[in-house]
Amino acid sequence: MSELLSLFTNILLPIFLIVAAGFLFGRYTGISSRPLSQLVFHLFSPCLLFTLLTQNRLSGGEISRVMLFATIHPTPLDGLARSLRCIPGSLQPG
């Protein structure tokens, strides 16, 4: 039970607090979310990725498998999306 509480406190609670803060900020300030989302995407996401990559404890083999998966996995999905686009009316709202 203490592991579950620790998991909630250390992982889920900060996420919920950030989401709640963002919701309240957007609701009461009326600021558009587009500039903020662009800032997060273009500045903070690469910073987070760099930090995670430099502080990871993965072996070279594990990193290679992750990179291979990230490279190969989108290919079939791209093919499926392209094939569905060729079918008339397949991507039209019901």
Image: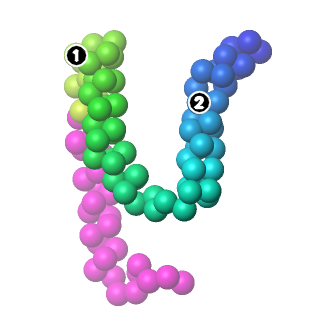
Q: Residue 41: image x %, image y %?
A: 33, 47
Of residues 13 and 56, the one drawn nearer to the viewer in this rendering: 13
The N terminus - image quarter = top right
Q: Residue 83: image x %, image y %?
A: 29, 72
As drawn, the residue found furthest toward the front would be 29
At mark 1, the secondary structure is helix
Seen at 62% across and 36% down, the residue is: 17
Q: Quadrant of residue 65?
A: top left
Of residues 50 and 90, the one drawn nearer to the viewer in this rendering: 50
Q: Amino acid at mark 2?
A: Pro
Of residues 17 and 87, the one drawn nearer to the viewer in this rendering: 17
Disc 1 designates what residue? Answer: 60
Reply above or below: 60 against 30: above
Q: Amino acid at mark 1?
A: Gly
Q: Quadrant of residue 46?
A: top left
Query: Mark number for residue 5?
Result: none
Reply above or below: 74 against 18: below
Using the numbered discs, state the Cα–Cα distance from disc 2 to disc 1 in whole angstroms: 31 Å
Residue 82 within the magenta-colored segment of the rendering: yes
Seen at 34% across and 31% down, the residue is: 48
The C terminus - image quarter = bottom right
- Give the overall secondary structure of the magenta segment: helix
Q: Which residues are magenta?
A: 68-94
Q: Estimate how packed mark 1 is, as few (under 14), some (14 to 19) or many (20 or more) residues with alpha carbons within 10 Å.
A: few
Disc 2 designates what residue? Answer: 14
